[in-house]
Image (cartoon, rainbow, N blue to C red):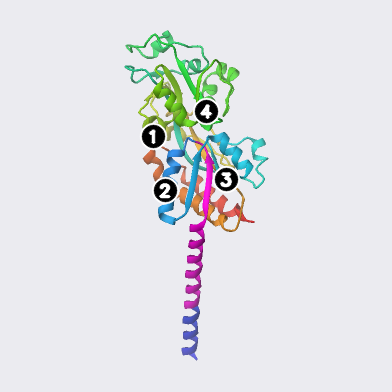
Amino acid sequence: MVFLTNGLRRAVTLSTATIAFSFGSVYTAIAQTVTLNGAGATFPKPLYDRYFDQFKKETGIQVNYEGIGSGGGIKQFIADTVDFGASDAYPKAEDKSQMKKGVILVPTAGGAVSVVYNLPGVSNLKLSRSVLPAIFMGEITRWNDPKIAADNPGANLPNKPIRLAVRSDGSGTTKIFTSHLAAISSAFKSKIPPDAAPTWLGNPLSGKGNPGVAALVKQTEGAIGYVEAAYATQNNLQQAQVQNKTNRFVSPTLAEANKALSSITFGSDFNVTGAADPADGYPIAGVTWLLIKKEYDAQKAPVVKKMVDWILTKGQAINGQLGYTQIPQTVASRAKQEVSTNVAAR
């Protein structure tokens, strides 16, 4: 009897293992036939390209991502034409109300927004908290203005007009940038309220996405604009040192971005507070999010969960390689749990 019981136990164990192996194989086969499509922010595009390339190598799952700007990503997510969206600007309440399959905002990275310029012969340009907003309001219009000169003693500033370069599309990068300028200048806030698509004064140059603004600045002598730091580095653009709350002139390095974002707070819905003018570090920095639905079909739901889990674990190791900050581990764990619990197959 004992022999039969042990034999039966071995048989049952073998059958269970076989079933588990078969289920895993079937899941893997199904997952590898599923393609996820996303669109949105250009701010994290270099990072997401690396994420999804490595994710495919490890899992066989194809994820396509198009950098069309945060505004475009939110619109496509609302229209349900993508599997996930991406934005550097937290969606407005009226936008979230139109997301019929619900939304979970998953923070993936933080990063610096560089102030880039094209002035041959002028390196290490410094821009104070009073000068930077005045430039983007159109109050300072020439590079040899005494206020810029006061921040840059000994610099050979040219007697040339300043050409502003801004985003033509709805942009989380613009929201991060204008939020900082509004936080340090009440005049800027009243004239150009912070927004993903503000109404700029004058007639600035405009380009689509971070790549568009980077290209404009690179080809236009006398231009100044703002792009995510990775684009500034990739395009060998001059990057200004910006004065922070402690009155230090700071470059947009990873260490300074980490210092700035270490003081921000993530709420229960993963929105952040304290990022517009941090206590120290590089002062123009923000967080970027994935927009994940709460409802997917039976094949995509587990694949989306797997993608989010990978990004918030293995993927975070890639962030620093490209100049992005990591999401705090406690916040990442909470976001993974939110997706695991609330994303369902319908």
Q: Which mark is residue 174?
A: 4
Taking the spot 51% from the left edge, 11% from the top edge, the residue there is 139
**Of pointers 3 and 2, the one earlier in the residue sequence:** 2
Q: Which residues are magenta?
A: 13-41
Name the kind of residue labelled 2 in the image: Asp
In the picture, the quarter occupied by the C terminus is bottom right
Q: Are marks 1 and 4 in contact (CB under 8 Å)?
A: no
Name the kind of residue labelled 1 in the image: Leu
Q: Nearer the viewer, mark 1 or mark 3?
A: 3
Q: Which mark is residue 82?
A: 3
Mark 1 — residue?
A: 254
Q: Nearer the viewer, mark 1 or mark 4?
A: 4
Q: Is residue 85 left or right of residue 216?
A: right
Q: Which mark is residue 53?
A: 2
Q: Element at badge 3?
A: loop
Q: Is residue 5 magenta?
A: no
Q: Residues within 10 Å of mark 1 (few under 14, many from 20)?
A: many
Examine the rendered structure and indicate whether residue 133 appears above or below residue 321. Answer: above
Q: Position of residue 236 (x, y in %)?
A: 35, 28
**Of pointers 2 and 1, the one earlier in the residue sequence:** 2
Q: Is residue 72 left or right of residue 323?
A: right
Q: Element at badge 1?
A: helix
Taking the spot 48% from the left edge, 62% from the top edge, the residue there is 28
Q: Position of residue 148 (x, y in %)?
A: 41, 12
Q: Position of residue 247 (x, y in %)?
A: 42, 21
Measured Cα–Cα span from mark 2 to mark 1: 23 Å
Name the kind of residue labelled 3 in the image: Val
Residue 283 at least partly seen: no
Residue 1 at least partly seen: yes
